[in-house]
Image (cartoon, grey):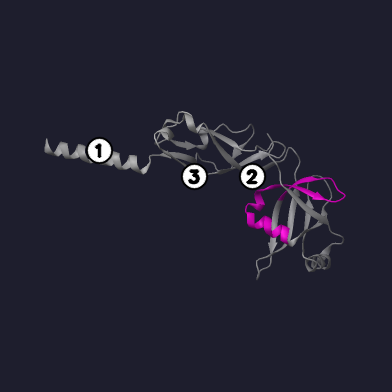
Amino acid sequence: MAGEIPDLIAEARTGTGKGAARQARREGKVPGVVYGGGADPIAIQIPYNVLLKRLKQGRFLSTLFNLKVEGQDDVRVICRGVQRDVVKDLPTHVDFMRLRRTSRVALFIPVEFINHEDAPGLKRGGVLTVVRPEVELVVTAGEIPDHITVDLEGRSIGDVIHISDVVLPEGAKPTIDRDFVIANLSAPSGLVSTDNAEAAETEAEDEEA
């Protein structure tokens, strides 16, 4: 069930304090620290371009990473803060927290839609409008799902699919405490036009009668 966790490659940083951090930045690295998980904090540094690319991909603070540091065991981490230059808005320091397999963490999980061919609404030319291609769930670090599944079998035009309609992995819980919409099946524009025309004709006949 666990999804593929992206690697984040870092280097061990010798020395601590402002001097060592400034030296790392001069070398094109962003200094950081890894803490928690019942182990001592370790000082790291990440190539600036690597970190900037990850930040631009979005959701950096809610992505679980497999942190790889040469000479040390891989560890699962989640970012708990990115300090930025107040003028340039570029990263200057990053904090990561280690996670045990039993740790609970909020992550965005992709939504997969299946059985399109068994949805009467789609057969009639209906359109599946995906409101949330990802859903933020609180999950266990050791049991991260690849995706959650929405079964479209039997779905008709006008149906609205809520999070309560989805069978979530055991132990997973949405971060939003309401029954939000994931997708809906709407009528194609041609069908809407036909329905409107039929309604207009019916109204005209009623007026004539």
Asked if residue 90 is positioned above or below residue 63 in the image, the reply reads: below
> Residue type at mark 2?
Leu
N-terminal of the pair, mark 3 or mark 1, is 3
Bounds of the magenta segment: 49-78
Residue furthest out toward the left: 209
x, y percentage for residue 103?
72, 40
| Front in this rendered view, residue 116 or 6 | 116
Whether pointer 2 and pointer 3 mark residues with C-beta atoms closer than 8 Å, the reply is: no
> Residue type at mark 1?
Glu
The mark lying in front, picked from 2 and 3, is 3
Question: 135 left or right of 69?
Answer: left
> Residue type at mark 3?
Val
Asked if residue 162 is positioned above or below residue 79 in the image, the reply reads: above
Q: Which mark is residue 107?
A: 2
Q: Alpha-carbon distance for marks 3 and 1?
A: 30 Å
Q: Is residue 54 magenta?
A: yes
N-terminal of the pair, mark 1 or mark 2, is 2
| Front in this rendered view, residue 197 or 135 | 197
